[in-house]
Amino acid sequence: MLGAPMAAEWAIENLVWEQARLGATSDTGAKRVVTRFAPSPTGFLHIGGARTALFNLLFARHHGGKFLLRIEDTDRARSTEPAIAAILDGMRWLNLDWDGDEVYQFARAERHAEVARAMLASGHAYKCFATAEELEAMRAEQKANKQPLRYDGRWRDRDPAEGGNAPYVIRLKAPREGAVTIEDHVQGPVTVNNSELDDLVLLRSDGTPTYMLAVVVDDHDMGVTHVIRGDDHLNNAFRQLPIYRAMAWEEPEYAHIPLIFNPDGTKMSKRKNAVAVDEYRDQLGILPEALGNYLLRLGWGHGDDEIISREQAIQWFELSGVGKSPSRFDLKKLENLNGHYIRAADDDRLADLVAARIGFELSESQRDLLRRSMAALKPRAANLLELADGAAFLFRTRPLELDDGAQALLEGDARALLAQLHAALDGVESWDTEALEAAVRTVAEDAGVKLGAAAQPLRAALTGRRTSPGIFDVLALLGREESLARIADQMTVPA
């Protein structure tokens, strides 16, 4: 239980929140939209969570409202500071900017308990003294009789005085008659009979609030008008609504979005694919704007548009565009989209991102070389890993170690042809792609071979590999001295 100073502090804060909630109107007098993303910091930022956050952000921005972030850290055993840092880092990387400071749920435990006690006082909740052994026996009997496993309400109408000083929990006195219908913005009208719900625990015997209570209290106090979350939480909405009604609070509107599946229709898991946002950034080399665009199109659409900027997404996003069926994650489609954004990206920015993947600290001249190489490298790259791999030849030391493919390109008469190319290139006055191509083309014609046959041994000598950017771009980037030296190294068969 919090002390008097802390309780007073909470009273002031709750008053501020309540005033903000009641005054949350737009300039036109209409109620202002407030959404929230509420991850549990027990691990990484999941790709599905990132999409949920994106949809909440876009809906709020589209309606000129607010997008809030709440860290649901009530599971003290599993919530960690590194996980919180990973979530915040992932959201910032994806440009999912929330309004104001993030709210930490655990710090509001006294407020949650206050609401549970208020419901107890009003008769909308009751004390339950059932022991763990009694509840286990109850569930075993229900299982044997093939009944639904739910609390049977054994303390619902009993005099709490019967419990004496024994430990107790506070349970919601849920309605038992009738049914509740939610007009979900994605799922449509969904109805559940109240007889299917049980009296959930609001406050544990140690005085700590449960997740179900904390979510409702926080959403109310934060002024959340629209709860947009995964459809695995749809059942929770029916369990949480009685809390709103017991407290005479305004109910939010709901939108439960389908989950993201693998291409084969199975649930995404670490065993089959990357599920953490930072894996797409660090291990797969995906740009944030590409991942954001791809997540937007997973379950939401705007005609045939595929490439959608954040500004367009804010302008177009409505919940009516969200489909009911689960989306299937396709890494190939993401990489194709990422290739588009790489080609459109600023070369300085790409060079900075690739420099971190080169494996050593670049000098200023090397960084400038890397920046100049982007124009030649990025048309072929689907991710930052391919960009870094394609740029590696720029920083290799002589003599180059050739891979098997490059070795094959230097068999037969290739080294003699290299010597002719070296002589022709040594005579080029202006070291630019046009002059370099003209020189190589002349050698190829004199030797009676196609231009590609002359370019292949050059590629092997200059890069040590069978594939590379355009060979004339390679020559221009390496410069006269380095290019001629690398060619000379390969003109004779090594001993």
Image (cartoon, rainbow, N blue to C red):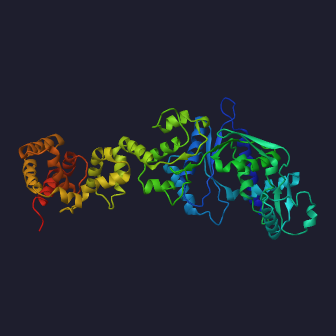
Where does the image place residue 419, in percent across and percent down from the top left? Answer: 8, 54
Please name the residue shown 76% across and 46% down the image. Answer: 241
The quadrant of the image that shows the N terminus is: bottom right
Where does the image place residue 390, in percent across and percent down from the top left? Answer: 29, 53
Depth check, front residue: 241 or 119: 241
Depth check, front residue: 31 or 233: 233
Where does the image place residue 420, in percent across and percent down from the top left? Answer: 7, 51
Going by the image, does 29 lie left or right of 343?
right
Q: Is residue 302 visible?
A: yes
Image quadrant where residue 200 sits: bottom right
Where does the image place residue 364, in percent across and percent down from the top left? Answer: 28, 54
How many marks do you count on the picture?
0
Q: Is residue 221 visible?
A: no
Residue farthest to the top, as pictured: 28
Please name the residue shown 71% across and 52% down the image. Answer: 215
Please name the residue shown 19% across and 55% down the image. Answer: 460
The quadrant of the image that shows the C terminus is: bottom left
Going by the image, does 440 lie left or right of 198?
left
Depth check, front residue: 349 or 342: 342
Image quadrant where residue 204 sits: bottom right
Please name the residue shown 87% across and 61% down the image. Answer: 154
